[in-house]
Structure formats: structure tokens, C-alpha cells
Image (cartoon, rainbow, N blue to C red):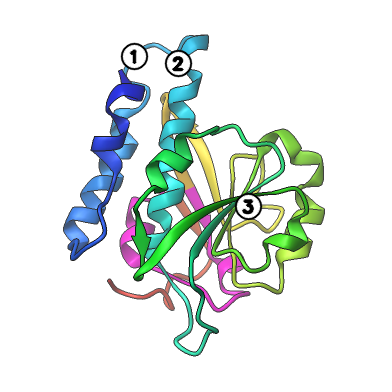
């Protein structure tokens, strides 16, 4: 059962993980969830996988060297939180670039401008445009499972394909910031729109 095993499958401990190991973890995420027929009670497992993706995305993004130092690596959930405490459990004791991971839950998108990753819930899709506008001038990786999130200017959108959680990337939105995505991340994306020439090799 996914809920009983997802942490050991997708958790990347802090330390010298190689690019191959990190890429393998993402491929496991793509293939593990949804191996059984989807029933209503299986829905929480979908968000287990999405929570793991949110945590691991941090290992595949780079910020400018001259960016102001931050004590924590903040993953922020804006509005409705469908992941519950799964994200907290996965993040406990984790670090990204030597910064402890911290989960924050925020009601106002403007307060997420200092976050590293912001998840915008699909259940709040009516507010997606205003939330993205509030973050547009900030170096925050925006992620959502809201329909047409990339078309609205989001950076990473979760999608379900054959009952598996995948993600698509909008590099045009990423390039409006100072963020750089690892080429490893782009290779396992379902689709990538925009110019990938500037993305870093890691």
C-alpha cells in the first residue's frame, strides 16, 4: 500500500546523493503510484506522491549565488491543504542546500514571496491568477495541480497519466525569475514548454 511504503521509496536523505540516484527516485515516483485500480479511498495516496515531489523539487532548482541567504528552505502551501501532515512527515529532518526544510501554510499569496516553493491548491483555482500575480516578481517555484496552471503562468503542474502522478514544466514562467531548473528534472517531466537551453546540468 502506498501510504505504508511511500516514505522509504521517495525520501532523499540529506548528504552526497548522486544525480543518478536522484533521477532514479523521480522515476520511482512516476511508476509507483496508481499501480492498482483507483478507488475513492486511494485518493490520499495521490497526495502522498505529490508531497514527495514538492520536497524533492527543491533538490533540482538553483537560485542565484548573490541571493540573500535564508535560514530555512521554505515549502509553502497557499490556501487549502490537501496533503495534511504527510508533507510535514516527509520534510522532518530534511535539508536542501544545507538549509532545514520548513513547511508553512499561508492564506495570502503575497506572504509566500519569501518561500522557495509555493504549492497552489487546485481547489482554490478561482484565485490562481491573483496568486500567481502576487508571486510574479519573486524567485519562488510555483507548483499546482489546478487545470491549465501552466497556461496561467505557473511553473510546474501535476497531471495524472494512466493513474500515475506526473508533472509538466513551463520554462517561460521559470525564465521570468532567477531560478534555474536541473536538466535531470526536465528529463523526467511529462512535457516541457519554453526554451531549455539555459537550464543547468547537474
The mark lying in front, picked from 1 and 3, is 1
Instruction: Using residue 29 as the reference point, say whether residue 18 is left or right of it.
Output: left
Examine the image and state in which quarter residue 65 appears: bottom left
Task: Point out residue 165 in the picture as x, y percentages from the top left corner.
Answer: 43, 34
Assign a secondary structure to mark 2.
Answer: helix
Circle 1 is placed at which residue position? 36
Assign a secondary structure to mark 3.
Answer: loop
Q: Nearer the viewer, residue 72 or 53?
A: 72
**C-beta proximity under 8 Å, tags 3 and 2:** no
Q: Is residue 121 visible?
A: yes
Residue drawn where x is 77% and y is 63% of the image: 134
Q: Nearer the viewer, residue 41 or 105?
A: 105
In the current view of this chain or complex, which residue is farthest to the bottom? 66
* Quarter the N terminus occupies: top left
Task: Point out residue 56 in the picture as x, y percentages from the top left corner.
Answer: 38, 53
Report the span colored magenta: 168-189
Task: Point out residue 67 in the picture as x, y percentages from the top left corner.
Answer: 53, 84
The crowd level at tag 3 (other Cα within 10 Å; few <14, some 14-19, many 20+) is many
Label 1, label 3: how far apart the Cα atoms are: 29 Å
| Mark found first going from the N terminus, 1 or 3 | 1
Circle 3 is placed at which residue position? 150
Residue drawn where x is 37% and y is 22% of the image: 34
Q: Is residue 170 above or below residue 4?
A: below
Amino acid at each position: 500500500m502506498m501510504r505504508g511504503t511511500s516514505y522509504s521509496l521517495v525520501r532523499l536523505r540529506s548528504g552526497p546523493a548522486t544525480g543518478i540516484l536522484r533521477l532514479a527516485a523521480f522515476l520511482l515516483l512516476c511508476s509507483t503510484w496508481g499501480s492498482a485500480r483507483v478507488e475513492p479511498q486511494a485518493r490520499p495516496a495521490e497526495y502522498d506522491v505529490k508531497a514527495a515531489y514538492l520536497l524533492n523539487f527543491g533538490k533540482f532548482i538553483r537560485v542565484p549565488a548573490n541571493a540573500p541567504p535564508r535560514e530555512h528552505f521554505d515549502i509553502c502551501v497557499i490556501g487549502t491543504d490537501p496533503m495534511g501532515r504527510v508533507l510535514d512527515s516527509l520534510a522532518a529532518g530534511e535539508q536542501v542546500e544545507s538549509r532545514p526544510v520548513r513547511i508553512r501554510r499561508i492564506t495570502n499569496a503575497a506572504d509566500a514571496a519569501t518561500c522557495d516553493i509555493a504549492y497552489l491548491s487546485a481547489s482554490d483555482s478561482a484565485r490562481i491568477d491573483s496568486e500567481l500575480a502576487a508571486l510574479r516578481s519573486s524567485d519562488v517555484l510555483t507548483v499546482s495541480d489546478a487545470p491549465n496552471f501552466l497556461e496561467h503562468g505557473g511553473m510546474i503542474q501535476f497531471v495524472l497519466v494512466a493513474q500515475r502522478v506526473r508533472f509538466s514544466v513551463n520554462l517561460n514562467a521559470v525564465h521570468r525569475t532567477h531560478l534555474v531548473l536541473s536538466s535531470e528534472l526536465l528529463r523526467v517531466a511529462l512535457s516541457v514548454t519554453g526554451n531549455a537551453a539555459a537550464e543547468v546540468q547537474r
